[in-house]
Amino acid sequence: AFTLLELMVSSALISIVMVVLLTATSASLGMWRGAEQRISVDREARNGISLIADDLANILPVGDASPLRPVFRKEGNDFVMAFPVLRPTDYQNPDADNVGDVCYVHYRYINSEKKIYRSQIDSKATFDAIALGSPPAPSDYEMLADNVTFLEYNTYDANGRESADVHTVSLGIGVVDKQERENLERDPPVVTPPSKSTERFFSIHAVVARSP
């Protein structure tokens, strides 16, 4: 038989082992959830940002006098860019009477919403706007990326100097998960330690060569 003291010591040892196991399990679950959140943010962000990179890779060079000339500008804390792209009719609105593969895309980053929106103007509306001598107006914006903490850009001339005469554009985009974004918007902000942050950074570089 066990004495009372032996039972108490055994119970204490079992309690210590249980606490150690629970602590290890909790830490493992926390690391797993953090990894899942980072993977989710990365996957969702890549879907939208890949489309931006694809649009920029298919940009149509035009002259400064063209109504389709590219636009990259800040509007307060927001960012707008618009430019012509080459898109086969398969990638355009099937209900529209498309007349070619020249489209026009608008992007808008709204800082207060932490979202990037995209609007594609298909070929018929694009050519109608060219005939009027004006850039195509955006319509039917769709949300492309959410929880975007920042969007920065730089434009360079053909010699690699920062310039409004755009030859090359560079974009930097930061994305987090919803919970971390909400923490950053609190007053005062709750900053997540770097080791636990879900923030992901994306860089896009593209040549926006204008014809003479």
Image (cartoon, rainbow, N blue to C red):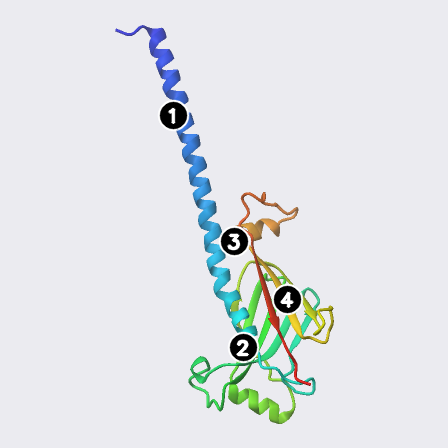
Of residue 38 and residue 116, the one placed in the foreground of this image is 38
Kind of residue at badge 3: Asp
| The quadrant where residue 130 appears | bottom right
- Gap in Å between the C-alphas at discs 4 and 2? 15 Å
Q: Which residue position is annotated with label 2?
A: 58
Which residue is at 69% across, 87% downward?
65
Of residue 201 and residue 116, the one placed in the foreground of this image is 201
Kind of residue at badge 4: Ser
Of residue 110 and residue 201, the one placed in the foreground of this image is 201
Kind of residue at badge 2: Asn
The quarter of the image holding the C terminus is: bottom right
Q: How many marks?
A: 4
SS for dot 2: loop
Which residue is at 56% across, 90% downward?
127
- For marks 3 and 1 on the same chain, the one whose residue lies earlier in the sequence: 1
Specify the label residue 170 is tagged with. 4
- Gap in Å between the C-alphas at discs 3 and 4? 24 Å
Are the residues tagged 3 and 4 within 8 Å (C-beta)? no
Q: Residue furthest front?
A: 159
Horizontally, residue 158 falls left or right of residue 185, namely right
- For marks 4 and 1 on the same chain, the one whose residue lies earlier in the sequence: 1
SS for dot 3: loop
In this view, 192 is above or below 2? below
Specify the label residue 18 is tagged with. 1
